[in-house]
């Protein structure tokens, strides 16, 4: 390594040691790092604001517009082979990247009480970080199930350590949950101005659902508005995924509708070519051909049984919305049941996920067998019934009795879909005991992104 490279490497280490000192709140013992970082910022023509954890990234860009493009491209993109470009050490870039990390993971996130404004700023700073990784806003926080780029290629831009996308996503989601818990949420919700600054997220919705019995007046109204906004945003994403998922097979036994929009123009022209008259230059059509559009459908009863215990909030919210979407499809008779140690039949409100969520009670134990026994009472025609069980499969009663109940549902001819994870990130803990036994029965527990469940249900329905 040349002397110049060694000098730049030392300067880079100053930047990241100072970042670590700030994140772990030991800046008082590392004043020399602060002084050295200020000198570095001045040397590379950056304002001292890049060292200030209190200044949001949007404010920084507003004051120094020329930095926006650099922030957006602070993490190098890998080439087609997944290799990062071999670029020289760039301390200016390191300082900007450390500013981004400082805002997302720094001391402002460690305050004992988080204000609505601080939480709002944090979500915006995370969105900047997601954009730098090439991800859609909210995707790394698990919001709305949005997809994004692969951030793994960008890690190592400064610190030289590769962090997986799943690791980063789970870390940010856990961090957001902690921030929301430290918010003086009840007081914030009483103030309409502050409540309007809140960004709806899964963590915030979970906290609101847990605390809704303690809210009243303006606080309760603002909580309902936030839940409604999040439900509407997530519903739009899930509707699009439902529309894009593969549909059922075309039923050629059903004659095509003879309407203009179904006209198969290419086939009509091709089949009538023998009728072409070269003398007058006209093609005489004696038969029109139409596209078959009828799908093979059977009236299907869809029974969604979802765990409402504290560990299943993400799954419950998403599946409640998903059930409401399928309930509005023709030929689908949707039923929704939520359970912990009790069972709640939410079918009367299945088309309104907002009303469903307001009626849920988070927490408590888990008696899955009790819920499935109630669901069995709704099975009238097993061949035309699908039971979707969403749970982590940690049964509060007997595992063997639950397995026997599941086996009875399957042997009746009912379509049984066990689901262990429908979170935005796709990560979840599921009982290994049930994972192995259901897989041996030919019904492996579905894990991963909610898109998998959507495809599974559309293929079935």
Image (cartoon, rainbow, N blue to C red):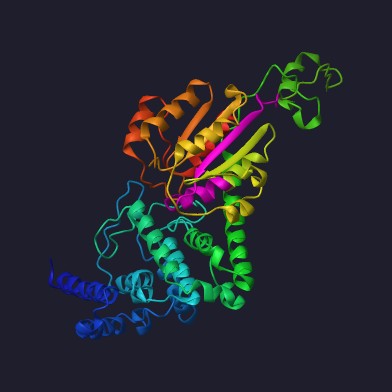
Residue 226 position, x and y percent, is: 59, 64
Q: Quadrant of the N terminus?
A: bottom left
Q: Residue at position x 50%, y 52% from top?
A: 146
Q: Quadrant of residue 159?
A: bottom left
The question of residue 398 being in magenta is answered with no
Q: Is residue 402 above or below residue 311?
A: above
Magenta range: 292-320
Residue 424 located left or right of residue 301: left
Give the camera-side residue of 247 and 73: 247
355 lies above or below 123: above
Task: Based on the picture, tell me whether residue 317 belongs to the magenta stretch.
Answer: yes
As displayed, is residue 107 above or below residue 394?
below
> For the C terminus, which image quadrant?
top right
Q: Residue at x 78, y 25 (%)?
A: 257
Q: Position of residue 133 (x, y in %)?
A: 40, 59
Give the percent coordinates (x, y) of residue 245: 56, 37
Left or right, 325 with respect to 20, comes to right
The x, y position of residue 408, in whole percent, is: 47, 24
Which of 298/98 is in front? Answer: 298
Residue at horizontal 32 percent and vertical 49 percent from the top:
82
């Amino acid at each position: 390594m040349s002397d110049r490279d060694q000098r730049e490497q030392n300067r880079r280490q100053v930047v990241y040691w100072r970042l670590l000192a700030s994140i772990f709140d030991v800046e008082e013992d590392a004043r020399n790092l602060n002084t050295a970082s200020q000198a570095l910022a001045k040397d590379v023509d950056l304002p001292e604001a890049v060292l200030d954890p209190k200044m949001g990234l949007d404010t920084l860009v507003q004051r120094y517009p020329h930095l926006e493009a650099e922030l957006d491209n602070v993490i190098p993109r890998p080439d087609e082979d997944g290799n990062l470009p071999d670029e020289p050490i760039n301390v200016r870039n390191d300082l900007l990247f450390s500013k981004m990390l400082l805002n997302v993971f720094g001391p402002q996130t460690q305050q004992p009480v988080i204000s609505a404004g601080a939480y709002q700023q944090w979500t915006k700073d995370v969105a900047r970080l997601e954009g730098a990784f090439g991800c859609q806003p909210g995707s790394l926080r698990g919001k709305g199930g949005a997809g994004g780029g692969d951030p793994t290629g960008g890690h190592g831009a400064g610190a030289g350590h590769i962090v997986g996308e799943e690791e980063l996503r789970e870390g940010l989601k856990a961090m957001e949950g902690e921030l929301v818990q430290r918010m003086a949420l009840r007081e914030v919700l009483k103030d309409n101005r502050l409540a309007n600054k809140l960004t709806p997220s899964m963590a915030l919705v979970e906290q609101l659902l847990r605390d809704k019995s303690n809210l009243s007046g303006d606080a309760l109204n603002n909580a309902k508005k936030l839940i409604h906004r999040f439900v509407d945003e997530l519903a739009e994403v899930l509707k699009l995924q439902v529309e894009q998922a593969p549909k059922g097979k075309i039923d050629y036994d059903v004659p095509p509708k003879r309407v203009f929009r179904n006209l198969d123009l290419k086939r009509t022209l091709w089949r009538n070519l023998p009728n072409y008259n070269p003398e007058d230059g006209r093609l005489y059509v004696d038969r029109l051909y139409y596209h078959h559009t009828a799908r093979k459908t059977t009236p299907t009863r869809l029974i969604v049984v979802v765990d409402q215990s504290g560990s299943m909030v993400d799954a419950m919210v998403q599946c409640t919305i998903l059930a409401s979407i399928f309930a509005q499809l023709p030929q689908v008779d949707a039923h929704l049941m939520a359970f912990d140690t009790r069972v709640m039949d939410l079918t009367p409100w299945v088309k309104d996920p907002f009303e469903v969520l307001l009626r849920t009670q988070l927490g408590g134990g888990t008696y899955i067998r009790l819920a499935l026994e109630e669901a069995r009472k709704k099975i009238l025609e097993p061949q035309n019934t699908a039971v979707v069980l969403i749970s982590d499969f940690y049964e509060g009663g007997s595992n063997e009795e639950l397995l026997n109940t599941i086996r009875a549902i399957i042997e009746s001819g009912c379509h049984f879909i066990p689901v262990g994870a429908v979170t935005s990130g796709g990560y979840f803990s599921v009982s290994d005991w049930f994972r192995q036994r259901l897989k041996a029965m030919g019904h492996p527990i579905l894990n991963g992104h909610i898109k998998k469940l959507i495809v599974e249900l559309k293929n079935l329905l």
